[in-house]
Image (cartoon, rainbow, N blue to C red):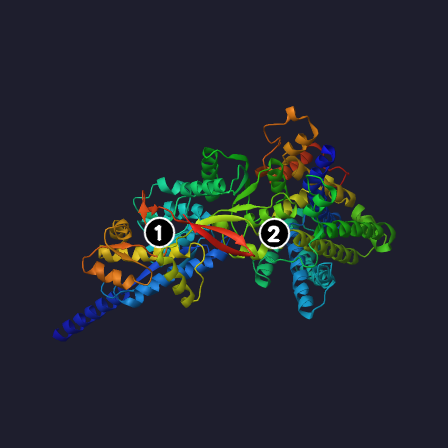
């Protein structure tokens, strides 16, 4: 009997040790469109989120030395059904504690409402910018390190007005992101005294955009605003407009800023301009160096992706638990003042301050300041295409 | 001057793209019509056959480029067409041997062929994904333009530019050449005549000693030639995206049915009807009217019949109307 008790106790002990070891590893979902219309941008966003996760994991300072592992899920950016299934897999089968993502507004909304809400999982998106996400029912689970497109609309109107543009034609990709951004641009540009000659949708994944380009050209305007995707219809529209001589200058919103566009279009794109979220804060420069060392580029939305992952992990530390229900209340606290300012590469320091009961104000790579329903206040980087490359002109 | 401007605007945004797109649809529809005329089923795999043909043309283009062979100013892909066509003939004959022949021996109903072709469509789609991947490929090299919009404006002093791409010119020239060759083949050669006889009345043709296997083989060979050229030209003009060909299937079938299934002339006319309907119905005529009408009449709106969102609905509507009003199409083909 005695020996049986011993064995039983030993077994129980072993089992509990084993479970503890398993529970020690926290999984985070990295939920971006690794395939699909913005895959060239995501190629830098994924590694950026994973860089923050690795930094925290290696520090050993999170929740008494737990390690963190990134698990990738593919949103496809456009297919809500696939994105929902991928989110379902991340949460129920992989058991991730929270999700960095999604990327495009439509799939993010779908994953949030169908999977994250019922399961009570926190999502922090670096790049879903639809204004509709500000007011969506989220039980406090959804945040974004990207600004709402309501803000981008103002930026677009400001830049166009500064350039002395009075008339624009506007085309958008026919989904939540494109529609939201187009509405916001139209409202703001009209309020600033400009004229929008036409607002026309285009579908992604088509071969031929001559009908769309024909309609846009007929409506006319000094500049064509292309609220689309860089690897998809947006590129097709620009190519078609240049080929037929319909427009010479284009305004490129966030989804269209990237190095692949000037490469694909060539010298004709020189002189076009736009803006995407970005900042000249010291964090951005540090992050660019870290990215280079890790073997990827600090491309569009990659700083936001790093920050989204960092915020989740810092909130876990502040809450003292990796549970979404606990960490969701801490996200705003760690992101905003008061507290010690935290830049990229200083996550270990932040974790230690939080462990000691202190306060942090996470600045990060994109000068994070969460407002309203938990979204970035919005810093934009105005760019211009010159000599076949994207060049930053100034920051707003 | 205003009249000229209006005409150039129409040519640039309707005529040139319409003719190029119409030629591409016509070549696609000819392939569908050949299969329908001889083998008597709607080949839903035709879109993917075009895509696979374009893929082979691109693979051979890469080979030629790496060997430094070029035919500038023409794009290299034109050179890749010949080996690509041979590959596609083999591919189609193999699929016929292992899929369609079985159903022919069973004397299966057309709808069973149709379902089998849908299966082949997915298979071909998978093979393409496997070989070349789902990414876009740029295929145009050589001179991109025959006529540039900016140069045209400077040369003529007009407000409106006219652009003609090399790919558009090649498309139209190739389409005309192929159509002439096809008609010569069908009207003048013995094989062509036996094909027409087989298409008109299968039993009578068999009684008069026409070898059905040979007719089927020639039909697939023609389909391979038409599909490969149509697919490669479409890719050359618009950039090769492996999966846009699936969407091209609808306008291609609409063209074949509008013109009359089984009728080669019908396929060509149908192609241009569909292409021009898609482009003109969604075109905003504001600019043209502004040039033609006195200033006081200048329209406030865009003078657009349908927003471009409904572009694809246009071919659907034409298809439905034709099927209801005259199911045999313009040129009295076979009804579905």
Q: Residues within 10 Å of mark 1 (few under 14, many from 20)?
A: many
Q: Is residue B325 above or below residue B33?
A: above
The nearer-to-camera label among 2 and 1 is 2
* Left-right relation of B42 to A88: right
Q: Dot 2 surroundings within 10 Å: few (below 14), some, or many (20 or more)? A: some
Task: Work out whether residue B184 or residue A162 is closer to the camera in this orientation and state it.
Answer: A162
Q: Secondary structure at mark 2?
A: helix
**Could you say which disc has been placed on residue B329 in the image?**
none
Provide residue A202's location: percent of width, then percent of height. Answer: 55, 43
Image quarter (top left, top right, bottom left or bottom right) of the C terminus of chain B: top right
Total residue callouts = 2
Please give the chain letter of the residue carrying mark 2. Answer: A
Circle 2 sits on which residue? A268
Mark 2 vs 1, N-terminal side:
1
Residue A5 x %, y %: 14, 71
Which of the pair B281/B312 is nearer the observer?
A: B281
Residue A92 appears anywhere in the view = no
Say which element carries label 1: strand
Determine the residue positioned at 50% across, 54% down. Answer: A36
Q: Quadrant of the N terminus of chain B?
A: top right
Give the image location of residue A246, x and y in percent: 63, 43
Residue identifier under label 1: A124
Q: Nearer the viewer, residue A186 or B254?
A: A186
Is residue A44 something one can see in this rendering?
yes
Left or right position of A114 against B55? left
Q: Which one is in front, B304 or B233?
A: B304
Check the image and name the residue furthest to the left: A2
Horizontally, is A338 left or right of B211 in the view? left
């Amino acid at each position: 009997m005695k020996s049986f008790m011993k064995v039983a106790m030993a077994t129980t002990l072993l089992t509990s040790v084993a479970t503890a070891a398993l529970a020690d590893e926290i999984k985070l979902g990295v939920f971006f469109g690794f395939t699909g219309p913005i895959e060239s941008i995501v190629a830098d966003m994924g590694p950026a989120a994973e860089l923050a996760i690795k930094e925290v994991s290696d520090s050993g300072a999170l929740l008494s030395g737990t390690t963190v592992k990134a698990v990738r899920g593919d949103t496809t950016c456009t297919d809500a059904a696939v994105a929902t299934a991928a989110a379902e897999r991340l949460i129920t089968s992989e058991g991730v504690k929270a999700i960095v993502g999604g990327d495009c507004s439509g799939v993010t909304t779908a994953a949030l409402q169908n999977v994250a809400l019922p399961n009570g999982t926190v999502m922090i998106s670096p790049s879903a910018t639809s204004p509709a996400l500000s007011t969506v029912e989220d039980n406090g689970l959804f945040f974004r390190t990207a600004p709402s497109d309501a803000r981008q609309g103002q930026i677009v109107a400001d830049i166009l007005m500064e350039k002395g543009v009075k008339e624009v034609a506007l085309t958008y990709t026919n989904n939540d992101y494109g529609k939201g951004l187009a509405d916001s641009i139209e409202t703001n540009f009209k309020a600033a005294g400009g004229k929008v000659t036409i607002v026309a949708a285009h579908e992604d994944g088509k071969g031929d955009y001559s009908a769309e380009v024909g309609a846009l050209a007929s409506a006319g305007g000094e500049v064509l605003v292309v609220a689309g995707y860089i690897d998809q219809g947006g590129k097709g529209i620009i190519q078609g407009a240049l080929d037929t001589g319909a427009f010479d200058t284009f305004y490129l919103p966030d989804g269209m800023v990237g190095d692949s566009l000037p490469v694909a279009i060539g010298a004709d794109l020189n002189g076009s301009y736009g803006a995407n979220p970005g900042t000249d804060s010291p964090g951005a420069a540090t992050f660019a160096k870290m990215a280079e060392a890790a073997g990827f580029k600090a491309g569009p939305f990659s700083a936001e992706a790093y920050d989204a992952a960092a915020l989740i992990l810092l909130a876990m530390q502040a809450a003292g638990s990796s549970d979404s229900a606990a960490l969701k209340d801490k996200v705003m606290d760690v992101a905003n003042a008061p507290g010690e300012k935290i830049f990229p590469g200083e996550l270990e320091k932040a974790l230690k301050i939080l462990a000691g009961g202190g306060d942090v104000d996470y600045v990060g790579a994109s000068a994070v300041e969460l407002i309203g329903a938990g979204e970035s206040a919005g810093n934009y980087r105005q760019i211009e295409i010159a000599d076949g490359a994207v060049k930053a002109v100034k920051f707003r | 001057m205003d009249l000229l401007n209006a005409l150039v605007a129409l040519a640039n945004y309707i005529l040139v793209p319409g003719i190029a797109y119409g030629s591409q649809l016509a070549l696609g529809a000819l392939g569908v019509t050949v299969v329908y005329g001889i083998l008597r089923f709607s080949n839903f795999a035709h879109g993917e056959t075009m895509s696979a043909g374009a893929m082979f043309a691109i693979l051979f283009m890469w080979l030629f480029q790496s060997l430094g062979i070029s035919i500038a100013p023409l794009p290299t892909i034109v050179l890749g067409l010949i080996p690509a066509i041979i590959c596609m003939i083999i591919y189609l004959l193999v699929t016929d041997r292992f899929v369609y022949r079985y159903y022919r021996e069973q004397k299966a109903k057309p709808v069973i062929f149709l379902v089998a072709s849908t299966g082949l469509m997915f298979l071909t789609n998978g093979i393409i994904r496997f070989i070349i991947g789902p990414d876009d490929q740029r295929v145009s090299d050589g001179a991109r333009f025959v006529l540039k919009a900016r140069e045209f404006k400077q040369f003529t002093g007009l407000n409106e530019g006219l652009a003609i791409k090399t790919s558009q010119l090649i498309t139209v020239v190739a389409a005309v050449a192929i159509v002439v060759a096809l008609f010569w083949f069908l009207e003048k050669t013995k094989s062509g005549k036996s094909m027409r006889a087989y298409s008109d009345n299968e039993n009578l043709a068999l009684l008069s000693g026409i070898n059905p296997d040979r007719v089927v083989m020639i039909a697939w060979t023609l389909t391979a030639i038409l599909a490969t050229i149509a697919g490669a030209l479409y890719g050359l003009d618009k950039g090769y995206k492996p999966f846009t060909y699936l969407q091209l299937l609808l306008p291609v079938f609409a063209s074949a049915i509008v013109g009359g299934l089984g009728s080669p002339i019908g396929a060509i006319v149908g192609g241009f009807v569909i292409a021009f309907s898609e482009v003109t119905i969604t075109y905003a005529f504001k600019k043209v009217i502004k040039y033609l009408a006195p200033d006081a009449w200048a329209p406030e709106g865009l003078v657009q019949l349908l927003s471009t969102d409904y572009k694809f609905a246009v071919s659907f509507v034409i298809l439905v109307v034709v099927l209801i009003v005259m199911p045999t199409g313009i040129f009295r083909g076979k009804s579905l």
